[in-house]
Amino acid sequence: MTTATPRPRPQVVTLTEAAAERVREIIANSDRSIIGLRVGIKNGGCAGMSYTMEYAEDIAALDEVVEDKGVKVLIDPKAVLFLLGTEMDFQVDTLSARFVFNNPNQTSACGCGESVAITPVALDA
């Protein structure tokens, strides 16, 4: 009997250097014991969904743990198929500083930029 070699799992999210630096700053300046950043999605908004981010003090049992550029990002298990292949960036311009998700699964966004439509990745059979 031959054993099939499992296909390597793609990393759900990658970070730009700017995003990793900002997460490191957030963790260093926190008065709580933060191990990383938890990222997910939620239903709502005019386009149907929005990205969520919160401080992570621990790893939940089903979290997808991504370590990139020295930063730990915990992905809510319900969001994995929606975020697969996403690059997280941090951008600063004249009027704002914000995390930006460059998501290949995002099909549209509302005019204000707070809400998105995302199609989950189809798994191979």
Image (cartoon, helix red, strand yellow):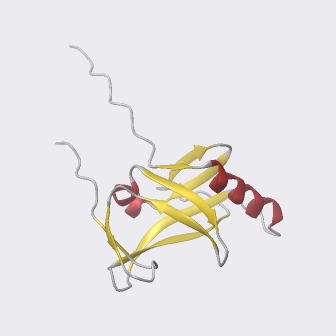
**Can you say whether 115 is above or below 60 in the image?**
below
**Front residue of this view, candidates 57 and 108:** 108
**Can you say whether 26 is above or below 125 in the image?**
below
As drawn, is 17 to the left or to the right of 4? right
Looking at the picture, how far across and down is residue 120, in whole percent? 28, 59
**Front residue of this view, candidates 83 and 2:** 83
The quarter of the picture where residue 108 lies is bottom left
The quarter of the picture where residue 31 lies is bottom right
Q: Residue furthest left?
A: 125
Q: Residue furthest bottom?
A: 46
How many discs appear? Answer: 0
As drawn, is 47 to the left or to the right of 77? left
**Front residue of this view, candidates 27 and 33:** 27
* Residue shown at the point (38%, 51%) measured from the top left: 84
Looking at the picture, how far across and down is residue 82, in whole percent? 35, 60
Looking at the picture, how far across and down is residue 37, in whole percent? 62, 61
* Residue shown at the point (56%, 69%) measured from the top left: 53
Looking at the picture, how far across and down is residue 57, in whole percent? 68, 63
In the picture, the quarter occupied by the N terminus is: top left
* Residue shown at the point (54%, 47%) measured from the top left: 66
* Residue shown at the point (44%, 49%) measured from the top left: 12
In the picture, the quarter occupied by the C terminus is: top left
As drawn, is 26 to the left or to the right of 95? right
Q: Residue furthest front?
A: 94
**Can you say whether 42 is above or below 87 in the image?**
below
